[in-house]
Amino acid sequence: MKRIVLTGGGTAGHVTPHLALVNHLRAKGWEIHYIGTHGGIERQLVGAELPYYPISAGKLRRYFDLKNLSDPLRVLKGVADAYRHLRRIRPAVVFSKGGFVAVPVTVAAWLLRIPVILHESDLTPGLANRLSLPFARRLCVTFPDTTRYLKGRGAQKAVVTGTPIRAELFSGSREEGLNMCRFTPGLPVLLVMGGSLGSAVLNEVIRENLAELTKHYQIIHLCGRGNLVPAANRRYFQLEYATEELPHLLAAADFVLSRAGANALVELVSLGKPNILVPLSRQASRGDQILNAASFAKQGLSLVIQEEELSGEVLQERLAQLQQERERFIAAMAASPIKDGTGRILQLIEETARQY
């Protein structure tokens, strides 16, 4: 049986595209293994479904921290851990979604001459993928413009594939989603998504303006683990994080307020959900979400509110605009070339494995 190792972690965005590939890979006869960290979210999401191999990994920080002195040693230990696992598994290919755990796995695979395919969801490559790229065969990208941020051989390795999207997201039931939240079909539904870890900024603005917002919308709020608060409002439904429920909640949503992680954006476009994006500020990130959001706004796919400008008043103004221009946004998303990349990536995996 053909064997593949998947890797990536740190956030759900580095894991969920793998989940879109798993059933397709199994149908094609692949035996699937996963390498992640000991306590990362990747273990929560895939550890019960796939053979899971934890390794040591150091966080790749862009700011001063005393842990920057010790983490290189953790990365080296991670390379040794990954080398041991890969030598035992002997996969035909490694597929990496990035995150700091991916670097030692990619290096170990290169040492063992196992081909590696990287995937970058964002417009600009993240640090983990930039460090991994010299050791990889291919870099799958979502945006054609990503190649402008690559140089030399790195640019030659890039292939525009899109992002894998979980098939179950297309099978949600609006009726079931409404029933789950005990909502009525007569009032628009706003889905608020702050990412797997939640967003303090989105949580605060929604809750501070809840009374006014729920005059016009029913709100589904995915607030992040540990962020639930008491709320007695029949037009407000909150969850820490949605898994099996997500397809139905998306089907129930008329509008979406979201961070601007690339995986979520591609899903929203594919599902035709009019959306407002609030990208992470440069104080909290490398600015990738700002660039993602700007690209989607330029293509007419999204409205954008910068985090520093977000307030209840601004949010209500943008929601009114989104509602007024709803059909225009839906038409733009239907015509967008940004689509599900599952088929192209599976093809690339098969081609690369045959060359191994």
Image (tube, rainbow, N blue to C red):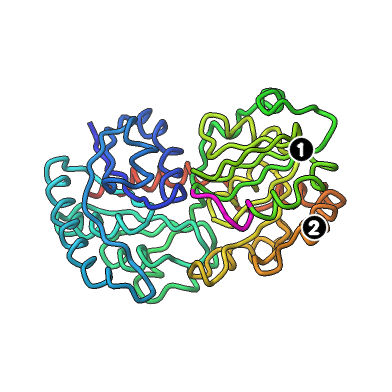
Amino acid type of disc 1? Gln
Amino acid type of disc 2? Arg
Please determine whether, in this image, residue 208 is positioned above or below residue 132.
above
Q: Nearer the viewer, mark 2 or mark 1?
A: 1
Residue at horizontal 38 percent and vertical 67 percent from the top: 127
Tell which circle, 2 or 1, labels the residue nearer the N-terminal end.
Answer: 1
Question: Where residue 112 appears, x then y in whole percent?
Answer: 14, 54
Residue 318, labelled with which disc? 2
Q: Which residues are magenta?
A: 197-203
> Which residue is farthest right?
324
Residue closer to the observer: 76 or 329: 76
Q: Are marks 2 and 1 in contact (CB under 8 Å)?
A: no
Residue closer to the observer: 310 or 304: 310
Report whether 41 appears left or right of 231: left
Residue at horizontal 64 percent and vertical 33 percent from the top: 249
Give the quadrant of the N terminus: top left
Report whether 216 appears left or right of 223: right
Question: Where residue 135 appears, x then y in whole percent?
Answer: 25, 63
Tell me if mark 2 has few (under 14), some (14-19) or many (20+) residues whose alpha carbon lies within 10 angstroms of its own.
some
**How far, Cα to Cα, is label 2 from label 1?**
16 Å
Instruction: Tell me the quarter of the picture where residue 316 sits.
Output: bottom right
Residue closer to the observer: 70 or 120: 70
Please determine whether, in this image, residue 88 is positioned above or below residue 266.
above
- Name the residue beneath numbered marker 1: 218
325 within the magenta span: no
